[in-house]
Image (tube, rainbow, N blue to C red):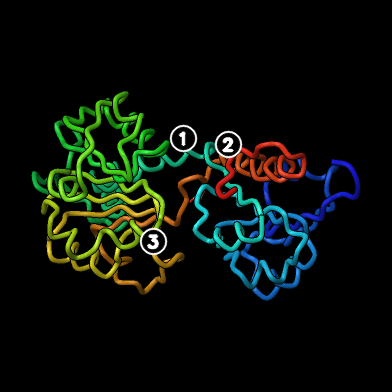
Amino acid sequence: MPGEKPKVYITRRIPKPGIDILKDHCNLSFWDSDEAIPKEDLLKHVAGIDALLCMLTDPIDKEVLDAAGANLKVVSTMSVGYEHINIEECKKRNIFVCNTPNVSTDSVAELTVALLLLTCRRLLEGVNAVKNGEWGKWKPMWLCGTELSQRTLGILGLGRIGYGVARRLKPFGIKRLIYNDVCSVGYADDIDAKFVDFDTLLSESDIICICCNLTPQTKHIFNKNAFKKMKNSAILINTGRGGVIQHDDLYEALTSDQITAAGLDVTEPEPLPMDHPLVGLHNCVILPHMGSNTWDSRNKMAETAAGNILAVFRNETAIGQVNI
Ligand SMILES: O=C(O)[C@H](O)CO
């Protein structure tokens, strides 16, 4: 990179491998906190920067892009999701937008399987029963859940993560694997998954895993109408994005026995307020968006997000280039 070092602003403390990649080649400054940067501070700190390394909690909208000014060449998010970035506006301004697509696939797929087992087998209720002194003599019908063997598993979004989940769950004895996606995908043959329309996914799945992005097409696709089409015994797992589910309708479905249980790693909003009705339900397991919380993934996410910035300045192809 000839000439002056590019000014890079990082909106959070990030793992050292990311910093190491950038520190000798850029003028780095960052929000020195583990908490999200407030919008007014973001607006101040982006003025005149050449590159922004942001998190999924930072809305990179027109206002932020205006505040950054004409030098901004790349917005690199340390996440797979990029719905927090105004992609169209970046496109108009010839700003590259990059994400970290490949590095958290295993961690999120593993977490999805863990959440699915936690929910299907009512494990948290069991742990709480022991802690609360509710463990009496063995009872034949106490805390009975759903087993995976001989079930139909439905996946919404058979991308890398959906495929990773399906591959891991097949050895549990899943009888049938069906999926819905914006198109039929190459992974399907490898795991013998059949493409079905969304209504069939709803009506024939015993367990549904949401592994898709949030797009205008998937926003609130799990709503009152969708829940009506699902089996009463169905279990819904979401590790994609909270906005795919209409949460008031989910509450209704879980409390009226329309469906049996849900396991959510992502919610709308995040964080979900403590007094949200879903929080109190015994049949709704909620995790605090921790799908990619492993050091392996986080280090690689930081490396990739940093590497993408250098790639853009070196006129090389970034790993996760989403808009140009
Ligand atoms: O988009 C992502 O990368 C996840 O949701 C957070 O790791």
| Residue at disc 2, secondary structure | helix
Q: Mark 1 Cα within 10 Å, few/some/many (few <14, many 20+)?
A: some
Work out whether 110 lies above or below 211: above
Mark linked to residue 267: 3
- Residue 304, image quadrant: top right
Residue 204 in percent (x, y) is at 13, 44
The one nearer the camera, 295 or 73, is 73
Q: Does ligand 1 reach within 8 Å of label 2's beta carbon? A: no
Q: Is residue 5 left or right of residue 60?
A: right
Ligand 1 within 8 Å, label 1 CB: no
Disc 3 crowd rating (10 Å Cα; few below 14, some 14-19, many 20+) is: many
Secondary structure under tag 1 reads helix
Count of marks placed on residues: 3
Give the label on residue 106, or none.
1
Depicted 172 relative to depicted 242: above or below: above
Residue type, label 2: Asp
Q: Nearer the viewer, mark 3 or mark 2?
A: 3
- 10 Å crowding of disc 2: few (<14), some (14-19), many (20+): few
**Identity, as a three-letter code, of the amino acid under mark 3:** Thr
Query: In the image as oriented, which residue stretches furthest toward the right?
Result: 3
Q: Earlier in the sequence, mark 3 or mark 1?
A: 1
Which residue is at 32% across, 48% downward?
A: 210
Residue wearing tag 2: 296
Label pair 2/1, CB-CB below 8 angstroms: yes
**Counting residues from the N terminus, which is met first, the one under dot 3 or under dot 2?**
3
Compared with 243, 167 (above or below) is: above
Q: Nearer the viewer, mark 2 or mark 1?
A: 1
Q: Amino acid at mark 1?
A: Asp
